[in-house]
Image (cartoon, rainbow, N blue to C red):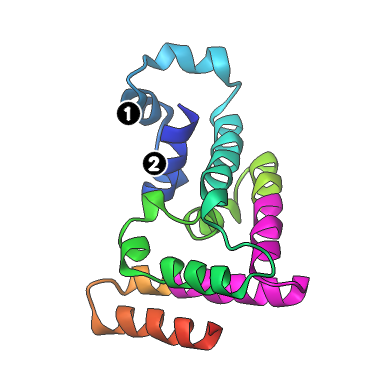
């Protein structure tokens, strides 16, 4: 149920997904939800944690430049742009969690810090790289289907090389 929620929330936005949607997609009855979670907010927090955990094996190896370049190329790909439900939790949850429940924001904060540590030896450089990646993928998704979308991905890739 948590993994299903993580994919649905990233793909449709938190407000665009109901508990009933999650349960139906998971093949469960809505009544079973409250046996596992006190609220949708609790599910959101767990979904954020699950999304970051799912992404972890794909992250760059800290300090390995070849791994970093490969991660940047995968992140700034058309495949990632076109499949937000399977993509980065930073881009998938960021806008929603600015107004989201505290526990989910805390889980998100921890995930952002961990992602940044994988991108550069220095915390500030890692955060700057992560901001470039996330901003680029959000803009590329918002302009999808246009020439600008591809140019955004290429420009960010160039800036991070």
Give x and y (percent) for residue 76.
42, 71
Is 154 above or below relative to 40? below
The N terminus sits in image quarter: top left
The residue at the point 41 percent across, 74 percent down is: 139
- Which residue occupies the extreme left position in the image? 145
Q: Mark 1 touching mark 2, by CB under 8 A?
A: yes
Count the marks: how many?
2
Where 112 falls versus 26 (above or below)? below
Secondary structure state at the residue bearing disc 2:
helix
Q: Secondary structure at mark 1?
A: helix
- Residue positioned 44% across, 44% down in the render: 9
Q: Is residue 72 magenta?
A: no
| Residue hosting label 2 | 8
For disc 1, the marked residue is 25
Residue 136 location, x and y as percent? 46, 75
Location of residue 84 (image quadrant)? bottom left
Label 1 crowd bin: few (<14), some (14–19), many (20+), radius 10 Å: some
Asked whether, in this view, residue 81 is left or right of residue 89, the answer is left
**In-image side of 51 versus 118 (left or right):** left
Q: As rendered, which of 17 and 90 lies closer to the eye?
A: 90
Let me know if residue 131 is in the magenta part.
yes
Predominant SS of the magenta segment: helix
The mark nearer the N terminus, 1 or 2, is 2
For the point 47% across and 87% down, the residue is 158
What separation in Å lies between label 1 and label 2 (alpha carbons)?
9 Å
Q: State the residue at coordinates (32%, 24%).
A: 24
Bounds of the magenta segment = 109-138
Residue 39: image quadrant is top right
Relative vertical location of residue 18 with respect to residue 66 in this rendering, above or below: above
| Mark 2 Cα shell of 10 Å, populated few (<14), some (14-19), many (≥20) | many
Locate residue 149: give its quadrant: bottom left
């Amino acid at each position: 149920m948590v993994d299903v929620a993580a994919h649905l929330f990233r793909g449709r936005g938190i407000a665009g997904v109901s508990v009933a949607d999650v349960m139906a997609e998971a093949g469960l009855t809505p009544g079973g939800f409250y046996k596992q979670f006190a609220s949708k907010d609790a599910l959101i927090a767990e979904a954020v944690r699950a999304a970051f955990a799912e992404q972890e094996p794909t992250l760059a190896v800290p300090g390995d430049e070849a791994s970093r370049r490969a991660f940047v190329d995968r992140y700034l790909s058309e495949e990632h742009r076109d499949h937000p439900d399977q993509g980065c939790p930073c881009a998938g949850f960021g806008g929603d969690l600015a107004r989201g429940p505290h526990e989910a924001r805390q889980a998100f904060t921890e995930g952002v810090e961990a992602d940044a540590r994988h991108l550069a030896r220095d915390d500030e450089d890692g955060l700057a790289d992560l901001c470039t990646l996330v901003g680029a993928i959000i803009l590329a998704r918002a302009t999808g289907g246009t020439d600008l979308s591809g140019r955004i991905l290429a420009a960010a890739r160039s800036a991070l090389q």
